[in-house]
Amino acid sequence: MLRITLLFLVAHVALAQVSNQDLLNPPPENWLTYGGSYDSQRHTKLDEITPGNVKNLQAAWIFPITSTNRLQTVPLVVDGVMYVSAPNEVYALDARSGREIWQYRRANGLNRGPNRGVAVFGNLVYVGTPDAYLVALDARTGTVAWETQIAKTSDGYFSPGAPFVADGKVIAGVGGGDNGLNGWLDAYDAETGKLIWRWYTIPRPGEPGNETWAGDSWKTGGGGTWLSGSYDPELGLIYWGLGNPAPDFDGDIRKGDNLYTESVVALDLKTGKLKWHFQFTPHDVHDWDSVEIPILVDAQFNGRMRKVMAHADRNGFYYVLDRETGEFLHGTPFIDQLNWATGLTPEGRPIRVPGVEPTLTGNFVCPSTSGATNWMSPAYNPVTGLFYLAAKEGCGVSFKGRQEFRPGGFDFKATGYIESPEEPWQMYVRALDLTTGERKWEYMQVNAKSYGAGLISTASGLIFGGDDQGTFAALDARTGAPLWHFETNYRISASPISYAVNGHQYVAVAAGVNIIAFRLPDTN
């Protein structure tokens, strides 16, 4: 009888549906999108865990996924059910206990790239795969409802980013830009998987922007769409950051600005038509993908309310744009070690320092190719008015060569980079004023030298994040003071979330091969 009751409860929990209204106004107990909400602020309204009691936070459960050595997934939670992913795998878990409800495994023999998460809508869970399919699973059972091919894996494409659902459409992108494979964004019907529109990141002959590519270099221009995006339902626009041009380090064969690589684009959700674009690093030769998640905020700027977008780019500059028009409003460095540009023009173009580019013998550049930040998501707290991000100080030595494009997913970087031997890299959590980019505080992640976790902000005034040493920590959102930490003993390469079940707030993060959920202990 007990077994029947437990199975009934699990089945009941797994019947949860996600509506358009849920996505437009997410219930605080759920985490329904990669960025937590359409504006990607990664701010939870839950406040049970506070600066005063966070010292009591404990690990509630751990769920291992041992098919990969470094998870990058951002879990989603729908009414007590957590959905997590790895390459070719999706799991539904009881979010209270970590107990497995179902699992899906795709047998394709490929393990190309990471998997950064799923999307949910209605009774379906959507995931991209290493063989470049978009798969829709029944949220109750894990069985395949439909699948559609995004790209040919024989060409070298894969789909590592978390899909994005808005207004009944599933938006999915592709990876492979470093192989000289041109990217695109697709919109699919969420119920059937039918393709609605496709927008190519590299303009073709006769299209605006193709003139920014010398000769036929556009054919192997890159411009991957390997992360996720944001959405403004009032404007009907989705915002997506785009990857680097190819070959990465040899710009001689692709002279020009190389649109729309290293840009954020605003697309009409209904049609896929480009409304506007802003390019952060024209003619990039440092592999500074601009895929970092854009945060959308309605805020006062120069005395009037504006719909703004905040973006911390891998090139080391923090940008504020008008998200209705793409107008550049403000930009400033968010790192100290920056030698490739002296600033930005009134239009937002970088003012380059001559000679700071890859060479045959190697050239010193700050930030390094790994960037001043990367896929780890920033956060925004509407109470403090601060933008929080994981920032890396460090330089590199970049090399270029000459390389011929080969079809089939082969490397097309034309060499690469090494860490500067003069000074090791160092990771920080930094808080910036939303509209000015002024640094308000920073927290140095001790011994952390490379990419770690993204961040989450809470209504009670906390910032949670992790590092490459496996430390998961809580900071005071106003001061940056460390208040709590937990040693996972695994490198953390994903962004945390927060959710609630039965009135109790949880914080969860992928650390190494484990999904770990934390909560406060019960009180008598």
Image (tube, grey):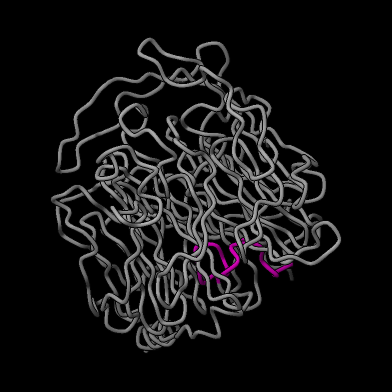
* Residue 4: image location, x then y, percent: 35, 88
Residue at position x 49%, y 45% in the image: 290
| In-front residue for pair 458/320 | 320
User: Relative to 399, does residue 228 appear above or below in the rendering?
Assistant: below
Magenta stretch contains residue 201:
no
The front one of 507 and 134 is 134
- Which quadrant holds residue 359? top left
* Residue 115 horizontal side relative to residue 165, left or right: left
Residue 282 percent location from the top left of the image:
49, 39
- The verdict on residue 41 being magenta is yes
Query: Is residue 315 rendered to the left or right of residue 217?
Result: right
Residue drawn at (57%, 66%), measured in percent from left and top? 36
Choose between 24 and 92: the one closer to the eye. Answer: 24
Relative to 4, is 425 on the left or the right?
A: right
Q: From the image, which quarter does the C terminus lie in?
A: bottom right
Relative image position of residue 182 (x, y in whole percent): 29, 49
Principal SS element in the magenta part?
loop
Which residue lies at the image location 15% right of the left edge and 57% below the top edge?
108
Location of residue 297 in the rendering, given as x and y in whole percent from the top left corner: 69, 63
Q: Report the quarter where the N terminus lies.
A: bottom left
Q: Is residue 287 above or below residue 300?
A: above
Work out whether 64 lies above or below 479: below
Q: Which residue is most to the right?
A: 303
Q: Which residues are magenta?
A: 31-47
Judge from the rendering whether residue 454 lies leftward or rightward of residue 177; answer left or right: right
Q: Between residue 486 and residue 450, name the one nearer to us.
A: 450
